[in-house]
Amino acid sequence: MILNYQEYGAGNSGLPLILVHGMGSAATAWQLVIPELAKSYRVIAVDLPGHGETQLSAGLDMSPKSLAEYVLETMDSLNISKAHLVGNSLGGWTALELAVIQPERVASILGLAPAGLWLAPFNVRYPGTAIARNLASSLKVVSPFGLKYEWGRKLGFGDVSPQWQKYSYQLCLDATLALANSTGYFPAWDAMLKKRFDEQVSSTVPITIVFGDSDKTLPASSCQEKSLAPKHATWINWESCGHAPMWDYPDRVVAEIAKLAK
């Protein structure tokens, strides 16, 4: 399956940079880092199936391994033989799986709060996930109004990050609508059940993993198991950071990418 994507900085030389968003998100999740990244890289931000502009076909396999295959197919369609990968949450897990499948296609990986590194696989959906998705769906008509106010942004993003107060109206609106319209949200969740990432990646693929100390979506107590990460990966914890480091510290994310994609 070829994913919908947005491309930036197409005239730049060097290996491309592919951005993979998380579950219930979309390519718009990268809006704070794309302008700076596009100065140096050819940047491709994909929409996973049932997210953003990519449609969800009936019965489509939404497991992280299959999502990695879809990214590979998209790379093939663009004649990209090798790329740097940046993934948030489910996108981070997808990037790791891609490096397992075809390490020769991956120049480096930056995993921002990657999913799959949990102590034990989940047998049921995370508590509150249905509530969050249904709330976003029911509020998407009024969200353009409510998100203009601090109380509205706190309601939607107070648990996402301690940095929520600096989130712009546009960022919050795009994220809310992405979640509300993500037909792939529950299929992706169900495809992660009884699974976790526990494979090794070739040491030829540089990997950096970043988690925030205030990540309530994938908390350190159950979802940040270092022993599951590739043994050669660099593991970093950022203070006062939630589940979307590219929103909390976009400059630091760009700097980490520059270290890997040098």
Image (spheres, rainbow, N blue to C red):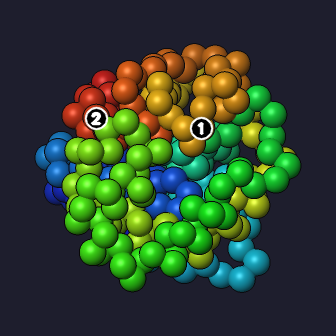
- Horizontal side of 16 relative to 52 (left or right) equals left
Q: Amino acid at mark 1?
A: Leu
Residue marked by disc 2: 249
Image quadrant containing the C terminus: top left
Residue 200 shows in this picture: no
Residue marked by disc 1: 218
Residue ranking furthest to the front: 151
Mark 2 near mark 1, Cβ–Cβ under 8 Å?
no
Residue 98: x %, y % from top left? 60, 46
* Residue nearest the observer in this picture, 147 or 23: 147
Residue 145: quadrant of the picture: bottom left
- Horizontal side of 241 relative to 138 (left or right) equals left
Which residue is drawn at the image coordinates 75% and 55% (left, top)? 125
* Residue nearest the observer in this picture, 224 or 79: 224
Q: Amino acid at mark 2?
A: Tyr
Q: Element type at marker 2? A: loop
Residue 237: x %, y % from top left? 45, 20
Badge count: 2
Q: CA distance from mark 2 to mark 1?
A: 18 Å
Residue 27: x %, y % from top left? 38, 62
- Horizontal side of 231 relative to 144 (left or right) equals right
Q: Is residue 61 above or below residue 115?
A: below
Q: Element type at marker 1? A: loop
Label 2 Cα crowd, 10 Å radius (few <14 / some 14-19 / many 20+): some
Residue 240: quadrant of the picture: top left
* Residue nearest the observer in this picture, 5 or 249: 249
Residue 186 shows in this picture: yes
Which residue is drawn at the image coordinates 47% and 40% (left, top)? 243
Which residue is drawn at the image coordinates 39% and 62% (left, top)? 175
